Amino acid sequence: MNNGLRRTLAAAAVVSLGLALSSCGSAKESSGGGSSGSASGSAGGGSTVGAVRIGLLLPETKTTRYEQFDRPLIEQKIKELAPQAQIDYYNANENATTQQTQVDTALTKGDKVLILDAVDAKSIQSSVQKAHDAGVKVIAYDRLAQGPVDSYVSFDNKKVGQLQGEALVAAVGDKAGSGSIIMINGSPTDPNAADFKAGAHSAIDGKLKIGKEYDTPNWDPNNANQEASAAITAIGGPNVVGVYSANDGMAAGIATALKAAGLSVPLTGQDAQLDGVQRILAGTQTMSIYKPFKPETDIAAQMAVTFAQGKPLDPALVPVTVTNGSGNQVPANLITPIVLTKDNIKTTVVADGLYTVAQICTPDYADACKAAGLQ
């Protein structure tokens, strides 16, 4: 664990919520993607919390992290801090209009805090304003929504892009002058994608020639595959010396396109998806960015329960301030990302319990795992 992550965990530990809630509540999943129930209790110091009802709104399911890690970890931490808390869950399945409707539903249900990972940071602004006007706190989770957001937790996204770009430059090495790279960025509606792109350009510009560059709606792996195929045709396969992919999901589609073209060139990624880790071991992906989910989910949960108590956030939990796209100043916690390569899979995603060796080292990757010291 690096020093930045240790500092983040230490900051998260500062908040002592001290809830004294007497019994566990329950939540039943509804057909509309939310869960229903009720909760009541008292906070430490004897103040009345009333209904501890929190809305969790995630953007999509194509990226495996949201259902596999973000949702269960956030829900687990909230229940740990406030056993009677009611969590209403929604997933917008990449539809910004659906997410706006889900915010309306959450407000109607009586959620007092929203943990919001926006599909479209700009279009959600009116919903954030509506929540604000209703006295509901909004925590921008992982993506910085526009509007009067109350707090934000994510990773240092420009740093993510910078680390990806630096890794690509290093991997291309002395072939930089003999061809071009392809850049396949994330969704234009995701403000994180713009930060990743800016960070990557800061490392790549002037060092690698960019032959083709795309912004990929909804981070769609199929679109990324088509973009990569078109770029390879336009540039010419022998002239492609590397590919920047903003995340592992798109890298999967890009790797397929590279294989079809008979190319083996450096390829970046992000999120440390299981298939991305396996591609790194197999040598068809160069690196990923590991963003430990638990520090981010724990901080989001602590923010939510603190707001539900009617308390201000401890300054140690929000040590910096960022400005969102609508010009609002937002207290924030930005976690340091980690570069994932074949050399540190064992000491990062395996040591942290993200994946077991058995999950990674399926028969197709057994030899690669042995070579990397995982078996």
Image (cartoon, grey):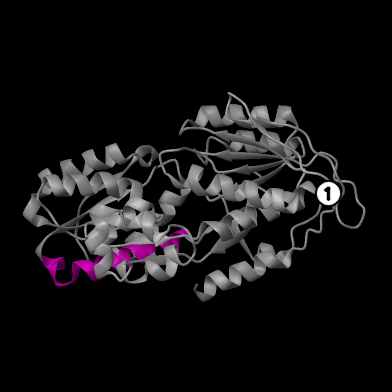
**Which quadrant would residue 27 be assigned to in this image?**
top right
Residue visible at 12% across and 44% down in the picture: 260
Provide residue 162's location: percent of width, then percent of height: 37, 64
Q: Could you say which is closer to the camera, residue 160 or residue 374?
A: 374
- Which residue is most to the right? 46
Provide residue 10's location: percent of width, then percent of height: 64, 71
**Which quadrant would residue 39 be assigned to in this image?**
top right
Whether residue 326 appears in magenta in the rendering, the answer is no
- Which residue is most to the top? 31
Badge 1: residue crowd in 10 Å (few <14, some 14–19, many ≥20): some
Quadrant occupied by the C terminus: bottom left
Whether residue 172 appears in magenta in the rendering, the answer is yes
Query: Which residue bears the numbered disc 1?
Result: 21
Provide residue 188's location: percent of width, then percent of height: 40, 42
Image vertical order of residue 102 relative to residue 6, above or below: above
Which stretch is magenta? 157-177
Q: Seen in the image, is 109 located left or right of residue 350? A: right
Identify residue type, mark 1: Leu
Image vertical order of residue 26 relative to residue 284, above or below: above
Q: Seen in the image, is 69 located left or right of residue 181? A: right
Residue visible at 58% across and 23% down in the picture: 31
Count of marks placed on residues: 1
Residue visible at 38% across and 61% down in the picture: 357
- Which residue is most to the bottom? 3
What's the magenta bit mostly, secondary-structure-wise? helix
Q: Seen in the image, is 111 located left or right of residue 58? A: right
Provide residue 156's location: percent of width, then percent of height: 49, 62
Query: Can residue 143 be seen in the rendering of this structure?
Result: no
